[in-house]
Every structure is written in C-alpha cells, then in structure tokens.
Amino acid sequence: MLSDLASGYLPILIFIYVAFTVAVVAVGLSFLLAKRKPDPEKESAYECGFPGFSDARAKVNVRYYLIGILFIVFDLEIAFLFPWALALKDIGMEGFWSMMVFLGVLAIGFFYEWKKGALEWE
C-alpha cells in the first residue's frame, strides 16, 4: 500500500525536478549570455517617478501606493463582474441587487478617496 502511494507521487516529484532544472538552466544561461551595457534610457525613472538603483531606504510618496491599491481594488472588481455577468440569468434579481450593493460600496470608497485628494498627483 505504501509503495502504491509513493508511486502516485513519483510523477509529481519528476515534474518538480524538471521544472527546477529548467528554471536554473534558464537563469544561468541568461546570466552568462546577456549583454550588460546599461545606458541612460534603461536607467531613467519610468513609472514610479524616482530613479532606479538608488538607496532602497529612500522615502517614496505614499500616493504611489494609494494608486496601486486603487488599481488592485478595481481590478478585483472587474474579476467579480465577469462571472457575475455570465451568470446573471441564473442568479436572478437577488444576485443583481447584491452586485449593485457591492458596486455601491466600491463607488463610495472611490468618491471618498477622490474627495480626499488621493487621486491628485503633484
């Protein structure tokens, strides 16, 4: 019985070994074969507004994190809206109004952050 259980896990262990080996080989080859020619364009500040490769303990504007959190919240909202829209016929009016309450809470939070000035980038 124990050998049957162990033989059931053998494909999983082989898969983990192959995945680890492929990952190590890919990272090793990219480290060996990559060209290391930094230029000013690659090292310029892109989206975050502060230069890369500086001190990791540098202060970052908290608004950057607020925008990131808002993106995650509204991205999750869309992730809930797609299955809801597909199942709207099956869930009926109860499902419709529960989603309206969900969207209302999100709208209240969005307007609160808007009024507090969290969306204003200076």
Image: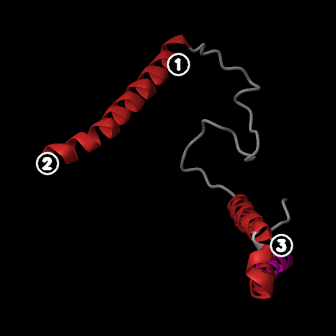
- Amino acid type of the residue that numbered disc 3 sits on in the rendered structure: Gly
x and y percent of residue 47 in the render? 76, 44
Give the numbered dot on residue 120: none
What residue lies at 77% left-to-right and 26% top-to-bottom?
41
* Residue at the disc numbered 3: 117
Relative to residue 52, is residue 11 drawn left or right? Answer: left
Give the quarter of the figure containing the C terminus.
bottom right
One can see residue 105 in this view: no
Residue at x 38%, y 28% (from the top left corner): 18
Q: Disc 3 vs disc 2: Cβ atoms closer than 8 Å? A: no
How many dots with numbers?
Answer: 3
Residue range highlighted in magenta: 106-114
Residue depicted at x 54% and y 11% = 33
Label disc, if present, on residue 2 of the rendered structure: 2
Nearest the eye: 100 or 74: 100
Q: Secondary structure at mark 1?
A: helix
Front tag of 1 and 2: 2
- The kind of residue tagged 2 is Leu
Which badge, 1 or 2, comes first in the chain's sequence?
Answer: 2
Bin the neighbour count of mark 3 within 10 Å (Cα to Cα): few under 14, some 14-19, many 20 and up.
Answer: few
Q: Which residue in the protein does label 1 denote?
A: 30
- The prevailing secondary structure element of the residues shown in magenta is helix
- Residue 52 seen: yes
Callout 2 environment at 10 Å: few (<14), some (14 to 19), or many (20+)? Answer: few
Q: Dots 1 and 2: beta carbons under 8 Å?
A: no
Q: CA distance from mark 1 to mark 2?
A: 42 Å
- The answer to whether residue 50 is above or below residue 113 is above
Residue 48, x across and y down, in percent: 73, 47
Cα separation between marks 1 and 3: 44 Å
Is 84 contained in the magenta span? no
